[in-house]
Image (spheres, rainbow, N blue to C red):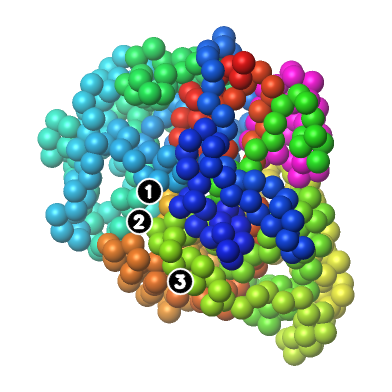
Amino acid sequence: MRASRPTALLAGAVALAATVSGCSGASSTGARSAQGSTTYQVSADTPAAKGSIPSFSWSLYAEPYSLDYTQAWDYPPNTVLANVCEQLFRITPDMRIAPGLALKSAHPNPLTWVYTLRSGVKFHSGSTMTADDVVASLKRHLDPAVGSAWGSAFKNVASITKTGPLEVTIKLNKPDVLLNELMAASPGTIESAAFLARAGRDYGNPKAGVDCTGPYALGTWAQGDSITLKKNAAYWDRTLTPKASVKFVFIQDPAARTSAWLSGSVDGGYLVPATSIGQLKSTSRGKLYFGPNTAASDLAVFNLKGTLGDLKVRKALSMALDRQSIIKAAVAGVAVPAKAPAARGAWLTAPDRTSGYFSALPDLVYDIDGAKKLIREAGATGKKVVIASSTLTPEITVVANAVQAAGKKIGLDVQIKPIAPDAYTALFTDPHARAGIDLVFTNGYINSPDPLEFYQSFRTGDFGNYGNYSNPEFDALYNRASAVADPAARADLTAELQKIALRDLPAIPLYEAPHSVFLGSRITGAPAGIAQLYYPWAAKIGSAN
């Protein structure tokens, strides 16, 4: 569930990536409850693998709707693609940007980015990557017929051209620092130009598959059941040589996923169901880890023309939510209340400033009487609000019920609309799927270490702007921030964007929780944090013994 796309979980522990090393889980930070007791530890990595194994299995809570990188807008496809396809840059487990298929980028002027490519990289089919492949891959985001979910990232691009055998130049209409950072995520994915031409409209589906450069190649895709990956013997990065082949199994039911881990029929998986945290903490069949996260759990407003179009109603609903109780019921207490739509863990470009930004924000108060007053002032008593719910994850149902109960207390008629698990993710990619829905629970993460990416989703016309929020003041400030190369100065402007978003509430903040992964007793080595969406995490997994 993606809203834009805590890591530094409390005010005294912000900027987690600055305090957590990537040394096999050796360095970690603890999050504390309101009573002060340590409740869980956050670490970038799990203990390193001790050797190879023939294979391991991994759960996905849903089958990927496509493996086309231009449509990779959610956890299931990215969890697979992270091991198969690569980007110009790479996100490391501690959420830093490192060289990937590009050795470096140059920024000779505000409207130009020049990428020097790595030589000798082979696609899974055996052909060698050139600048032509990079140009073809990036230009797909500009093609209306492709309908890229990442088209907004390329909004300022004037041209993408080959300027040498291993050099590609992007020219911009206006300065855009964020585009360069997103070359470490789906927008920067590189595919074989020849394969794209052959596959055509079938690219990324079970019939055609993909032909990328990662440590794993796509094996078989048994629709409705599983995807297998095979080791890429010609992979260029010998520090990430795969130790096992991989089988992804699709298990929608949270209880069934947990049972599969505990029985050993599935070796591990990310995004542990909150209802299983206590059980998985105490089992001898494996270990539960918590990692860095850029995600915050929010209520995304889908319809600003209905009841929630009145800011007083949005504020009232926010005030009626008992976030501490929601955290206890939805995620077993493993979270802290949010103060803004973007999580503290998303603020990695200026970690020394994060605490100051968040301490300057007001706490989100729980005030039923004040909320009732706002509803009366808005003339919204008895008006309907529809929130989507799904059995996809337990927290979706918990939050939907909590919102309905909060609405009843303040005079709103909150109705719950059940959505099938395999249709829930379509809410974030298909505007037609949102018809008749006012509000939805999201786990909004970013793909780069820059919080500006999150707030881009509130820019007028952005793909992730689900409710079509539009504020000229916000747009102008966003344009200023996206042109600033200095990370600290850009972060200061992003903090002002955060204040506007908190004032206007195009999304209502709920809580911040760490990323999670369960590893069965026979395996270890997986990164614990959300970097798994773009880092070839499966290549790190091997024998625990």
Residue 94 x/y as whole percent: 46, 44
CB under 8 Å between callouts 2 and 1? yes
Name the secondary structure under disc 1.
helix
Q: Residue at x 59, y 49 (%)?
A: 29
What type is the residue that disc 1 sits on? Leu
Where on the picture, by quarter, is residue 353? bottom left
- Mark number, residue 495: 3
Which region shows up in magenta? 250-277
* Residue 297 shows up from this direction: no
* Residue 468 shows up from this direction: yes
Packing grade of label 3 (10 A; few <14, some 14-19, many >=20) is: many
Q: Residue at x 54, y 37 (%)?
A: 26
Residue 86 x/y as whole percent: 38, 32
Residue holding disc 2: 178
Residue 302 within the segment the image draws in magenta: no
3D distance between C-alphas at marks 2 and 3: 16 Å
Residue holding disc 1: 182
